[in-house]
Structures are given as structure tokens and as C-alpha cells.
Amino acid sequence: MLAIAVSLSVQLYLSQSLDVDGMIFGALSGLVVLFVSGAMKKGEADELITNGMNMMAFIGFVMLAAAGFASVLEKTGDVKALVEASTGMISHNQVIGALLMLVVGLLITMGIGSSFATIPIITTIFVPLCLQLGFSPMATIAIIGTAAALGDAGSPASDSTLGPTSGLNADGQHHHIWDTCVPTFIYYNIPLILFGWIAAMVL
């Protein structure tokens, strides 16, 4: 917590007071606090930093792929046609529209295995569709956020399920699908659909 506070404080101070890009200095100060406090051992530093770089590389790749996907859809004009066709099928019914968007987001994220990777993809289609259906900005945010988070917990390829399985399978008796994915789907995704649906209607 101290490292986060120091990192953010240094970054904001340099950016606002000295008009310098303080992101690098903020990160460096956070690392110094971790080392000095002993929260991060010297032997762990290489692995932690490498894992962080891998994660950022993955995020960068996802953003590039999503930007390309969105650009292609925009240039071809298929987004507008898809939104108009979807709006006609839903008949401007917000209740049905919100439920269908949540289910579509669930299916996409289940396949991809990452809510972060899903958001750029569904935003391209969901934002125009929400505007057509008359959803408020807050309701649109609730739909997109919920739709992206839905499949993350129940996807067999998600970190949210692979992590617990790798720990719980220490005795070799833990089944990834039935002991991790299915229970998580039942106890997390189903309530999330209901609450996300209610939020879309209320907001």
C-alpha cells in the first residue's frame, strides 16, 4: 500500500508541479519502497518484473488487435448495418436488448478467456446499439462492464479459473471443469447477469 501511495504521489507531483512525465519516476520510487521495506526480495525481482512485462505486452497486443478490428468494422460500415438490424429485431425493447447483450458478452468472453480482451471488441458494437435503444451512459457502462466480466470467471481458459485449479490440484484430484469452472459459473455468472440486468434498467 505504501509503494502504491508513493508511486502515485511522485507521478502526480512531477506531472502537475514540474510538468514532467512522472510515470517512470513514480514506478521507480514504488520499486525502491518495495525493496527497502523487504516486501519484494532481491531473488524475486527478476521474475516479478518479467511477469509484469509479459502482462503489459499482452495488453498492448490486445489493444492493437482490438483497434484493428474496430477500424475494419468502421471502414466497411458493418457496425451501422449490424446495429440497425439488431435494433429492428429487438424492436427497441430495452429489457430484451440488455439481456441479449449480456449473453453475447458472456459467450465472447468464455471463448477468449479474458474480460480485458473482450471490452474493446464488444464496445464497438454495444455502444451504438445502446444509443439506439436509448440507454443512458451509466447503463451503457454497466452493460459493457458486466458483459465483459461475465465469462471471465467461468471460462476454462481464464486466469480466474486456471489459477485456482493449479493450486487446488496439488493432490491430483481436482477437475478443472467440474470443480472450478462450473461452480464459478453458477455462483458468480448467474447472479452477475441478474444484477447487471437490473443495473441497466435502473440506471
Image: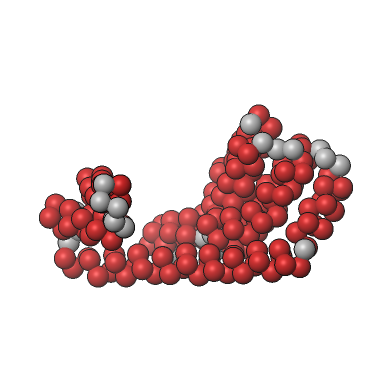
Compared with residue 24, is residue 88 higher up or lower down, i.e. above or below? Answer: above
Compared with residue 202, is residue 56 higher up or lower down, i.e. above or below? Answer: below
Compared with residue 129, is residue 53 higher up or lower down, i.e. above or below? Answer: below
| Residue 130: quarter of image | top right
Specify whether residue 9 is in view.
yes
- Residue 46, image x, y percentages: 25, 70
Compared with residue 1, is residue 124 higher up or lower down, i.e. above or below? Answer: below
Q: Is residue 40 left or right of residue 65?
A: left
| Residue 195: quarter of image | top right
| Residue 163: quarter of image | bottom left
Q: Residue at x 36, y 68 (%)?
A: 53
Name the image colouring: secondary structure
- Residue 193, image x, y percentages: 64, 41
Q: Residue at x 47, y 67 (%)?
A: 60
Q: Residue at x 22, y 65 (%)?
A: 44
Depth check, front residue: 196 or 61: 61
**Quadrant that contains the N terminus:** top left
Q: Residue at x 83, y 52 (%)?
A: 84
